[in-house]
Image (cartoon, rainbow, N blue to C red):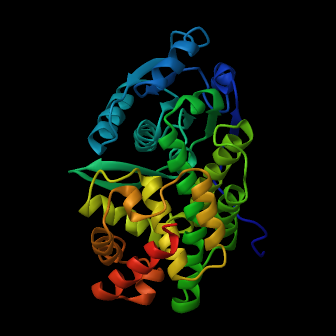
């Protein structure tokens, strides 16, 4: 019998709205997620602690709290060990991206469903099957189970630093560049391109590209939340980060390697996406530049505190960060003098 459909991992519930945290108690009593209410609450510093205080009355005594401070593989392993010693039937991660990644990794290690309660929108990790964790001073990506539930309370997101929101905008928009790189690899190398994964990632990026509401408006924050969720689903469909990670992410990894501390991840990929889309002469590059300007997202190397020389070295190093991946950078195969010329032209074109 022919295969008529495929099974795709996806959250059972996605709740994006102001006041969503108030409904978390009911969600956790849903027996599809927690059979007995024996929930492990993984809480990050700051707003995660505030969410926990709001939930205190809604949770029974069987819920156990695990504070997390830092996004390292060691912290995730320690959490996994602690979960193994307990008798929990679900994990709830409450906080920013680092906390959620630690919770996702630990939950996957012990085979428990995980609910993601995001207090910021800095990147697409809130709903992705990937955990980005530090080890030995470097970040690595680890495959994990996709969250069984995603909760985004816009009231908490709005309190987060604006830089985190702008980083999320950059991460969502970078999907457009990643999908273009994927299609280039398909055309040049015969790499299979999953149309559904590409459509999900591109749709998320385009929803931001054409938005004109204010950064803190409910309508925009809802669209950004959903765009980041779509990115996570795209990766689950593809079985890899390919639909959301191209030359822009190679550049981000190279920035972290050569100039650590220069910009958040979403800011780095925003600069990388604009540069690589310009290299590719993509038709949407003007709209991409306009959207980054509209929301105050970094566009140029100087916005990350990098000189043209610094950024040229980053671009030269970028392909080595993902040697198995074919993007516009591998396609053009530029030497350092050529890269420097293109970087100077790029800055001159967009520094207006």
In this view, 73 is above or below 156: below
Name the outermost residue toward the bottom.
188
Q: Is residue 304 visible?
A: yes
**Quarter of the view holding residue 283:** bottom right
Q: Is residue 278 left or right of residue 73?
A: right
In this view of the protein, which residue sits in the foreground, 88 or 263?
A: 263
In the image, 39 versus 341, the foreground residue is 341
Residue that appears at 64% across and 30% down: 153
- Percent position of residue 335, x then y: 30, 88
- Tell me where residue 326 sits by quadrant: bottom left
Q: Nearer the viewer, residue 86 or 221?
A: 221
Residue 120: x and y in percent read: 53, 37
Relative vertical location of residue 190 with respect to residue 199 in this rendering, above or below: below
Q: In this picture, is 327 found above or below 134?
A: below
Image coordinates for residue 93, horizontal then vertical, percent:
49, 32
Name the residue at 51% across, 14% down. 62
Query: Which quadrant does the N terminus fall into?
Result: bottom right
């Amino acid at each position: 019998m022919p295969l008529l459909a495929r099974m795709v991992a996806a959250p059972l519930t996605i709740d994006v709205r102001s006041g969503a945290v108030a409904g978390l108690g009911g969600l956790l009593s849903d027996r599809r997620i927690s059979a007995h209410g024996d929930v492990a609450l993984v809480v990050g510093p700051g707003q995660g602690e505030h969410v926990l205080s709001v939930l205190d009355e809604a949770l029974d005594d069987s819920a156990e709290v695990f504070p997390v401070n830092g996004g390292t593989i060691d912290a995730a392993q320690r959490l996994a060990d602690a979960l193994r010693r307990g008798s929990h039937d679900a994990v709830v991660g409450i906080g920013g991206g680092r906390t959620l990644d630690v919770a996702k990794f630990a939950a996957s290690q012990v085979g428990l469903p995980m609910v993601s309660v995001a207090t910021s929108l800095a990147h697409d990790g809130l709903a992705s099957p990937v955990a980005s964790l530090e080890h030995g001073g470097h970040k690595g990506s680890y495959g994990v189970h996709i969250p069984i539930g995603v909760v985004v309370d816009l009231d908490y997101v709005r309190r987060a630093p604006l830089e985190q929101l702008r980083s999320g905008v950059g991460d969502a928009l970078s999907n457009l560049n990643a999908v273009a790189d994927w299609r280039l690899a398909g055309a040049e190398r015969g790499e299979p391109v999953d149309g559904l994964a590409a459509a999900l990632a591109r749709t998320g990026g385009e929803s931001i590209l054409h938005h004109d509401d204010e950064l803190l408006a409910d309508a925009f924050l809802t669209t950004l939340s959903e765009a980041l969720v779509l990115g996570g689903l795209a990766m689950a469909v593809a079985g890899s980060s390919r639909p959301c990670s191209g030359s822009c992410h190679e550049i981000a990894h190279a920035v972290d390697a050569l100039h650590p501390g220069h910009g958040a991840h979403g800011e780095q990929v925003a600069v990388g996406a604009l540069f690589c889309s310009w290299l590719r002469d993509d038709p949407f590059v003007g709209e991409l530049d306009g959207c980054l300007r509209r929301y105050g997202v970094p566009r140029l190397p100087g916005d990350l505190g990098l000189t043209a020389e610094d950024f040229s070295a980053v671009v030269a190093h970028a392909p080595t960060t993902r040697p198995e991946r074919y993007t516009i950078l591998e396609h053009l195969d530029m030497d350092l003098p050529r890269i420097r010329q293109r970087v100077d032209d790029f800055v001159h074109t967009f520094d207006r």
